[in-house]
Image (cartoon, grey):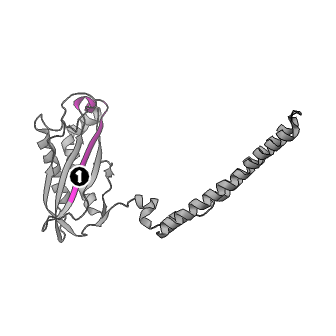
Amino acid sequence: MTSGTRSRTIASRINLFCLKLALIPIQIGINDKKTNQKAMGTKPKARNEDKMNTLKLIAVLGLGALVSACGNVPDIASRNAPFETTGMALIAPSAQTQLPQSMRVSAISVRVPRNLKVSEANVYYPRADIVWRGDPIGDRHAQIQSIFETAFASGTKDMAGVADVTLDVEIVRFHSVTEKTRYTVGGVHNMLFRLTVRSAATGEALAPAREIQANLPAFGGRQAIEAERRGQTQKVRVTGYLAQVIRQELAKPTVTDEPRTFAFRAK
């Protein structure tokens, strides 16, 4: 028998003993009731009932006190069990990896899966994976790929470190705004992608692949029109914003596999 099994057996016996103790007042009350019934025969039951009520109260109080006392018995089984058998072991910490402090990006691979659903519906909020109006109607998958390639190349061009790395990017969602939304209330450019940083020499992942969500406010109404006149088109703003996102993401010394969200305004 292992120490953990032996400890659990001891704890079970203690709890059983406490339960038996708690039942003693109730058993006494039952026996006393039977004795009184035999002794009194057909006499009035008022005094008998009063006595029984008192015994019931004592039994309840005794049961509560004993259960409380037994509840304070140390959790021997959990305390002596190996760490991997306790509840704490069920909560796995996030994987953490130290990226090279000095990097340069030699290649960027962006993939936009063809099974991502595209919508050209001019409604306030189409149900789709890809919604984009910053380019003429065409291959939206290719357009999104081009935006990410341009943005990430711009965001990493000044990185002139020692470690040569490549970026693997997979687009999960690219939900911008429709014409109807853009020229009324505005909305959010919601972009979600998975990023893996790899060694350019070996192709090995240097950090866990992580999911990054980037949210950029989308102008609406007069603000959208004025921004367009200044040359701040949707494509210009989104591309510049994604360049900031990748720059900040690669500047972190420690990387985890937890999803990250960026939600700040790009100029």
How many neighbours does mark 1 have within 10 angstroms: few (below 14), some (14-19), or many (20 or more)?
some
Measured from the top left, where is residue 245 in percent x and y?
26, 54
Above or below for 76 versus 175:
below
Q: Residue at x 28, y 51 (%)?
A: 212
- Which range is magenta? 178-196
Quick one: SS at disc 1?
strand
127 relative position to 60: left or right: left
Q: Amino acid at mark 1?
A: Arg
Of 100 and 83, the residue lying toward us: 83
Q: Residue at x 25, y 47 (%)?
A: 192
Q: Residue at x 14, y 41 (%)?
A: 114
262 relative position to 31: left or right: left
Residue tagged 1: 194
Q: Quadrant of residue 35?
A: top right
Q: Residue at x 18, y 40 (%)?
A: 116
Measured from the top left, where is residue 248 in percent x and y?
28, 58
Measured from the top left, where is residue 75 in percent x and y?
56, 63
Q: Is 148 colored magenta in this rendering?
A: no
Of 153 and 93, the residue lying toward us: 93
Above or below for 26 versus 3:
above
Judge whether residue 57 can be spotted in this image. Answer: no
Measured from the top left, where is residue 156 in percent x and y?
19, 60
Count how many numbered circles sit on residues in the image.
Answer: 1
Of 139 and 85, the residue lying toward us: 85
Judge whether residue 51 can be spotted in this image. Answer: yes
